[in-house]
Image: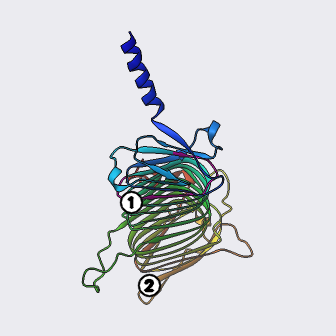
Amino acid sequence: MLRFLNLSSNLMLKQLHRSAYFDISKNAKIMINVCSPINVECLLPHEADRDSVQIPDNSLFKIVGNNISQSISSISESESTIKIPVKRDVDIVLQNASPLNFQKYEGLNASINSHGPVNLRKLRLFNLCVHSLDNISSVGYIEGNFSAFTIASMNFDNLTCENIELLFGGPACNVKSAYCESMTLKSIVPELSSDGVTPAEQMPLDINFGTLHGNVNVEIDGTAELNIGSFEGTLKLRQRLGKVSLHIAGPCPLLEIDVAEGDIEISLPIDSASPSTVNGLLDISASSIKLDKNTTPEDALDNWDISEGPGEQRFCGSFGPKTDEEPLWRIRTLRGTVKVSCSSWADAMMRNLGHVGQAPIGI
């Protein structure tokens, strides 16, 4: 009986010592520098405001002041969890290709640098900046100013941010919904090959947005298939090669799309229940222009005439109700076809379902 009690006591002690609390300075930045799989999240709600961190009590980590670190000699293959207080600045560095999770946190500024995949979940921060050499993905929401840089792919659920900056190498960038004041999306140009002259080959990119609202600037220096299921805001898009598909679902004060070589498909909104309040002046130049009369009501455009020029076709016509100042929708492709059709929001989103999330990179 005594032996049984001793065994039970030892087991209880081991469970109690799986993690430990360490006091840190009030309001100071928390620095985390590790080299094993790591999960960083907030302390439990009833203790989230305390000036301490909770780290595994397994000799893998050491803490000095507000710095949590791990030596290369203490690398572990299993994931460790570090819990930190709310409303702090946080720097997280992962020195190898292990996965990094950052989730369920509300704070000020957070910076992540990692060689491995970064998984984000339910974050509300003033500024979040992520640099990775592997995929970056999120589940749930990200709120606040957000910037992400990776030579690989991105996959995000819901971004509700003032400013968004996305730079990626590919092959994919999938975003289910993004609501922002401004967004910049750019592809990373591959470095030169070993001879220092020949550009490295860039893989075709697959870029998909379910819903995108904001003032957006896109620059793709390569081949891409870009699809936006529902757009509202201003859009300036430059793309070298590939295809662009866009459904305008709400007011669009400015639209500028330039593709050097590739097809562009523009879907304009129609609603059988009520007249559309979206309007714009289409100014199109392309090798070939197609106005889809099967889906576009006869009175949706004030002009259906396509003019012929040297090596190109031109179209200029107004869509929607007349106003004193019509938004300019300028669409250009040097070699390719521009197709204009009409679609309801529901039909446009159904088409988009086949694109967003087709190449998931998940937590």
Near-viewer residue (204 or 88): 88
Residue positioned 46% across, 50% down in the render: 62
Name the quadrant containing residue 278: bottom right
- Which residue is disc 2 drawn over? 312
Q: Is residue 92 magenta?
A: yes
Q: Amino acid at mark 1?
A: Gln
* Distance from the alpha carbon under mark 2 to that under mark 1: 53 Å
Q: Which residues are magenta?
A: 83-98
Q: Residues within 10 Å of mark 2 (few under 14, many from 20)?
A: some
Q: Looking at the picture, does residue 226 appear above or below residue 90?
A: below
Residue 280 visible (yes or no)? yes
Going by the picture, which residue comes out furthest to the left? 195
Asked which secondary structure carries label 1, the reply is: loop
Q: Nearer the viewer, residue 58 or 151?
A: 58
Quadrant where the N terminus sits is top left
200 left or right, relative to 33: left
